[in-house]
Image (cartoon, helix red, strand yellow):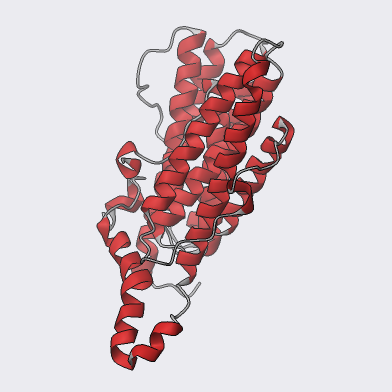
Amino acid sequence: MTSTPGTQQPVIAALQSALAAEQAASYGYGVVGAILPQGSAQQATASTDWVAHMRGRDELSTLITARGATPVPAAVAYKLPRPVRTPAEARALATTLEDGVAQAYLALVALPEKSLRRFGAEQVRAAALRAQAWRGSVQAFPGLPPAAVRD
Amino acid sequence: MADDGLVSGRAVTGPARRALLIASAAALPALLAACRGVQSLGTPPPPPTDVGTLRNAIDHETALVASYAAVTAASGGQAGAAGGGRLTAALAVVLAEHRQHLAQLKSRLIEPAGHGSATPAAAAGGSVILTIAQLEHAEQTASDRLIGQLAGLPPTLAQLFASIAASEATHVPYLRAARRGR
């Protein structure tokens, strides 16, 4: 690593943001899985997605540590964007979590480091695929805020 | 925060990037012409790599739009078949998204007169009607291609490429589900 601490600061910040999104998703999927019907295919999907986010969390922690920084620990609990009491609300939460993860990883794509760009893009794609499965529909610009693609 | 665009996850946006493209694609030949005289007009310098990459992406997206337009037109009469209505609707959704992708890509490129990119064969009309499975394959290929072209692109263009790559990857399971009537 030849970068100076000054040039690493935006890299670390983007990695920490992605880590925070993964930690929030890991917590949120615990709620999603608890609300979906026990033993259902959707609950199995939630479990698979939860594992994906735990892996993402671990990978980001490794990347942050490799750059001489300390991964910010997860919060004990997270405030959900809205109450989750029904399977439909659980699916909506999963979609929201994936959208947040996609947006956080897209920040890595703006960094100059080639490997981080690719990693970020592949994670945006993975999050978009999970979101599509929960949403049942597609989006033209996953991860991008509407203002970035306004006509 | 050193860079709100990075840490907030917001896309880096703005006219600065567009200005750069204008400078690189349009103003540079004019500047060189002014410096070297008329003879330099015959041999404009090659465009920067990212302009070439963007043109390439526009050509591929144009071809995808043409493919979907052809399939959508051809499938109109099959809407009554089992799952046909669902598939026709899904094709229309995906075609609309590709048109949005194409518009955004084109908005990032401002070319001087006479520098328009060549029309790809698939967009020239009379294109082969692809099967839905072939469209799914084309989507995955397009997604992989865009992710493979990120290195060296300006940040906002790289983010657009990555977002479009993600969108096009989601078209695969979306079309597959529609094809199976789910």
Q: Quadrant of residue A74?
A: top left
- Between A35 and A111, the one nearer to me in the picture: A111
Residue situated furthest front in the rendering: B126
Residue A105 drawn at (x, y percent): 46, 45
Q: Residue at x 49, y 10 (%)?
A: A88
Residue A120 drawn at (x, y percent): 51, 50
Q: Residue at x 45, y 29 (%)?
A: A97
Tell me if I can see residue B121 in this picture: yes
The quarter of the picture where the C terminus of chain A appears is: top left
Tell me if I can see residue A125 in this picture: no
Q: Residue at x 50, y 17 (%)?
A: A91
Q: Quadrant of residue B177?
A: top right
- Between B109 and A99, the one nearer to me in the picture: B109
Location of residue B50 with respect to A59 vertically, above or below: below
Q: Is residue B133 left or right of residue B76?
A: right
Residue A18 drawn at (x, y percent): 44, 44
Number of labelled discs? Answer: 0
- Between A47 and B140, the one nearer to me in the picture: B140
Q: Is residue B18 left or right of residue B61?
A: left
Location of residue B87 with respect to B159 vertically, above or below: above
Residue B69 drawn at (x, y percent): 57, 34
Location of residue B21 with respect to B140 vertically, above or below: below
- Between A133 and B90, the one nearer to me in the picture: B90
